[in-house]
Image (tube, helix red, strand yellow):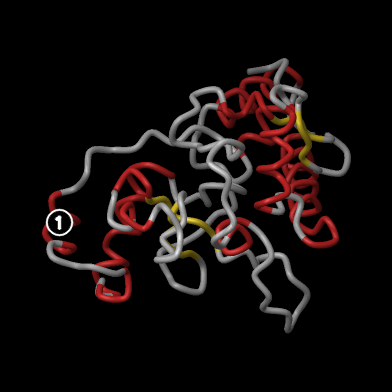
Amino acid sequence: MKFIKKASTPEFFIEDTDGLINWNQYLASNKRKLKEFILSKEQYFLCCYCEKKVTVDKESSHIEHIKPKSPQNQYANLTFDYNNLLVSCEGNHFNEIGDNSKTSCGHKKDNFFDENKFLNPTLILDIASFFIFDEDDGTIASSQKEIDKSTYTIDLLNLNGNNNRLAEARKKAKQAFIKNYSTLPVEQRKVKIQKFLQKESNEFITFFRYVFRNLS
């Protein structure tokens, strides 16, 4: 996870949600417009939690309420609070063929939420420092910095995926990355990697910044 700087509430969102009481009243076309804005202006078309590349299509992503919007919980009044909204993947990118279960990120979190434990990526500037990765298998774990919060967040969002499939995707991304640059001279390779690490839109960028932290 990485810090996501929220933009000012867009005027179109204020207009589109004026007078609305519940989320179901919010038109699908307006939700898509909002997703496009958040992904392009704030998240660089990455899932707010796992950093998988996503698109505005409903098969790829959904608008995520950091603090759940369920009418039965204490955060219902934040349903249309722009600062409570991000875009999450559908949590099924790395499933086996035919398995459409949503097992990570926003859908995994659902209405389970402890504000005192959850690491909110819009509020914690150094949020990446709460996590470490296994460079060989791609798994994410607590860095021991406020271990109760980092462990809670990893488990709540299932950031390694069922059967570690999300971790496996990070591992494969790293293998492809290394293969792509392995034939370059050492100094040229170093420059290329440094440029890559500066780009916020690269998939699994926090993982790559951890793996190549000595070069950043």
Q: Find the residue positioned furthest to the right.
A: 136
Residue 168 at x, y percent in the picture: 81, 53
Q: Residue at x 57, y 51 (%)?
A: 113
Please tell me whether residue 53 is drawn above or below residue 182 in the rendered image. Answer: below
Residue 205 lies left or right of residue 75; in this view the side is right
10 Å crowding of disc 1: few (<14), some (14-19), many (20+): few
Q: Residue at x 32, y 67 (%)?
A: 32
Residue 177 at x, y percent in the picture: 72, 41
Residue 112 lies left or right of residue 166; in this view the side is left
For the C terminus, the image quarter is top right
Name the one closer to the observer, 106 or 211: 106
Q: Secondary structure at mark 1?
A: helix
Q: Find the residue positioned furthest to the bottom.
A: 98
Q: Residue at x 70, y 42 (%)?
A: 152
Q: Quadrant of residue 77?
A: bottom left
Q: Residue at x 72, y 65 (%)?
A: 94
Q: Which residue is mark 1?
A: 12
Q: Disc 1 residue type?
A: Phe
Name the one closer to the observer, 192 or 94: 94
| Number of disc labels | 1
Name the one closer to the observer, 191 or 52: 52
For the N terminus, the image quarter is top right
Please tell me whether residue 51 is drawn above or below residue 110 in the rendered image. Answer: above
Q: Quadrant of residue 36?
A: bottom left
